[in-house]
Image (tube, rainbow, N blue to C red):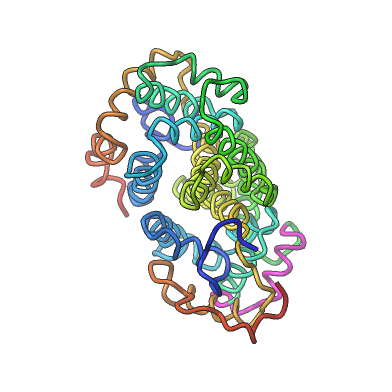
Amino acid sequence: MPHIPLDPELPGIRGAMAFRPETARPLNALVEVLLQGPNMLTRGERELIATYVSSRNCTQYCHSIHGAVAAAHLDGNEDLVRQVKVDFMQAEISPKLKALLNIAGKVQQDGKLVTPADVDLARREGATDIEIHDTVLIAAAFCMYNRYVDGLGTNQPADPAFYRERGKRVAREGYVAVSEEYLAPHSSTVAQ
Amino acid sequence: MPHIDLPAGFPGISAGFQFRPETAKPMRELAHVLLHLPNSLTPGERELIASHVSSRNNCHFCYSSHSAAATCHLGDASLVAKVKADFASAPISKKLKALLAIAGKVQQDGKLVTAADVEAARNEGATDMEIHDTVLIAAAFSMYNRYVDGLGTWQPDNPEMYAQMGQHLAREGYTQPSIRQPVGASSIVAD
């Protein structure tokens, strides 16, 4: 039961965003740049970072939907997504992505835990400054999205099937485009 | 020493924003809506929520700059210090105390917010929109703080610089940089 009245048809962050379109727009613009925009890290890699952080924060809606988007980018490989959540060191991903996930896990706890040794390790595996920057910011941003979704007590469906089709659509169309369907009809009634 | 090659002389988040303008833009816009645009919570109240969360995350740059902005809005630096030390005994409204309690839970984990916490805020007059914005301010500063700390940004101990930033933020908001050129080495008190 959400702490404030949110549209019951819109689970997770969608209900919160429909409640407040003024903040939804920059929130969607940020996730679009980080996860969908042009980047040397693939969309699948970036979604795995978002999924991993959301999983560590135990936010069901976020780790399920981003896991589904990641799988959609990774030829439907849901096992790989599951392995990254459980123990990324054993997953079939590049050493560079492992080093970046290590940094993301530190940021998820506290940014001050990231050490020069963590960053050197990522660099030795080929990570660039912008990839390190984006890893830190993806991890930081999902500490925000996760707290937003949990802090409002949003409805977070448990069934993986609920997320699978939407994950494919987000992977195809992007975050800003799919958000219009729930932002546009509400903007006239909720905007202050 | 920052973990990546950030522009020299730009403190805290201003270095991250210079390094990556594409992500800076929505991050600035979000702060502007949450902290600056008209709202039934005053800008001073909202800056106090931001500085409270940043204090709990031990993020020196964010705490100092948002405390300075709160001081500008409220005209009282001692009030900001009292909220930092113990908001429950600070001379602020009961509604703001109830919202700061919610913000403190979100800073740890959003799942800690209970129906009773929200009810307490509502009993003191908080609206749904104010509860929403409190949760999102606390969540957003859980991001800004981690971004500033996770890049190992330069966070000088320079009260004059933060006071100037606070004035800019209080007057202009967040869409334009408050630090436009490198901060001179002569003004660095400690690194």
Q: Please state which of residues A45 and B57 is positioned toward the viewer in this rendering.
A: A45
The N terminus of chain B is located in which quarter?
Answer: bottom right
The C terminus of chain B is located in which quarter?
Answer: bottom right
Residue B172 vertical position relative to residue A164 in the rendered view, above or below: below
Q: Does the segment drawn in magenta span residue A127? A: no
Q: Does the segment drawn in magenta span residue B84? A: yes
Residue at the image point whose x is 54% and y is 34% from the top: A150
Q: Position of residue A126 (x, y in %)?
A: 51, 42
Q: How many marks?
A: 0
Secondary structure mostly taken by the magenta-highlighted segment of the chain = helix
Residue at the image point whose x is 31% and y is 23% from the top: A168
Task: Quadrant for residue B187, please give it.
Answer: bottom right
Classify residue B159 as left or right of residue B125: right
Task: Quadrant for residue B171, please give it.
Answer: bottom left
Q: Position of residue A21 (x, y in %)?
A: 33, 47
Residue at the image point whose x is 49% and y is 49% from the top: A128
Q: Position of residue A41 (x, y in %)?
A: 42, 39
Q: Position of residue A100 (x, y in %)?
A: 56, 39
Q: Please state which of residues A116 and A73 is positioned toward the viewer in this rendering.
A: A116
Classify residue A44 as left or right of residue A55: left
Q: Residue furthest bottom?
A: B186
Q: Please state which of residues B44 and B123 is positioned toward the viewer in this rendering.
A: B44
Q: Which residues are magenta?
A: B72-87
